[in-house]
Image: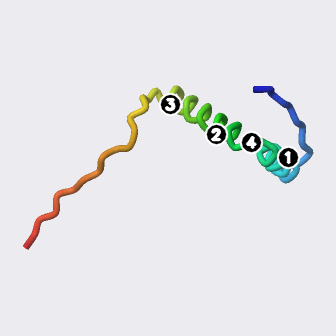
């Protein structure tokens, strides 16, 4: 992926530029970015890919 540097004069300008960049990407490129962010998160938190957690609770009936 090509890295691009953009210097903005305000946060609003930076947000607008980010939005335009993401809208110009294909869905596959956006999914690639999402996957890369997930991978970095797992490395940062030192977690494995567990999948969904199973949640259950025991309810007493009267």
Q: Quadrant of the C terminus?
A: bottom left
Mark on residue 17?
1
Q: Which residue is mark 3?
A: 42
Residue 11 image position (x, y, % from top left): 83, 49
- The residue mark sitting in front, 4 or 1, is 4
Q: Earlier in the sequence, mark 4 or mark 3?
A: 4
Q: Taking 41 as reference, is 31 left or right?
A: right
The front one of 25 and 58 is 25
Q: Secondary structure at mark 1?
A: helix
Q: Earlier in the sequence, mark 2 or mark 1?
A: 1
Whole-Å distance between the Cαs marked 2 and 3? 17 Å
Number of labels in the image equals 4
- The residue mark sitting in front, 2 or 1, is 2
Whole-Å distance between the Cαs marked 2 and 1? 19 Å
Q: Taking 17 as reference, is 62 left or right?
A: left
Whole-Å distance between the Cαs marked 1 and 3? 28 Å
Whole-Å distance between the Cαs marked 4 and 3? 25 Å
Mark on residue 32?
none
Q: Which residue is mark 2?
A: 31
Q: Earlier in the sequence, mark 4 or mark 1?
A: 1
Q: Which residue is mark 4?
A: 26
Q: Quadrant of residue 53?
A: top left
* Label 4–label 1 contact, CB within 8 A: no
Q: Secondary structure at mark 3?
A: helix
Q: Earlier in the sequence, mark 1 or mark 3?
A: 1
Q: Residues within 10 Å of mark 3 (few under 14, many from 20)?
A: few
- The residue mark sitting in front, 4 or 3, is 4
Q: Quadrant of residue 21?
A: top right
Whole-Å distance between the Cαs marked 4 and 1? 16 Å
Q: Quadrant of residue 37?
A: top right
């Amino acid at each position: 992926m090509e890295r691009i540097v953009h210097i903005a004069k305000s946060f609003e300008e930076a947000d607008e530029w980010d939005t335009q960049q993401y809208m110009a990407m294909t869905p596959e490129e956006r999914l690639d970015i999402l996957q890369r962010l997930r991978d970095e998160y797992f490395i940062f938190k030192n977690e494995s890919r567990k999948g969904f957690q199973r949640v259950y609770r025991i309810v007493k009936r009267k």
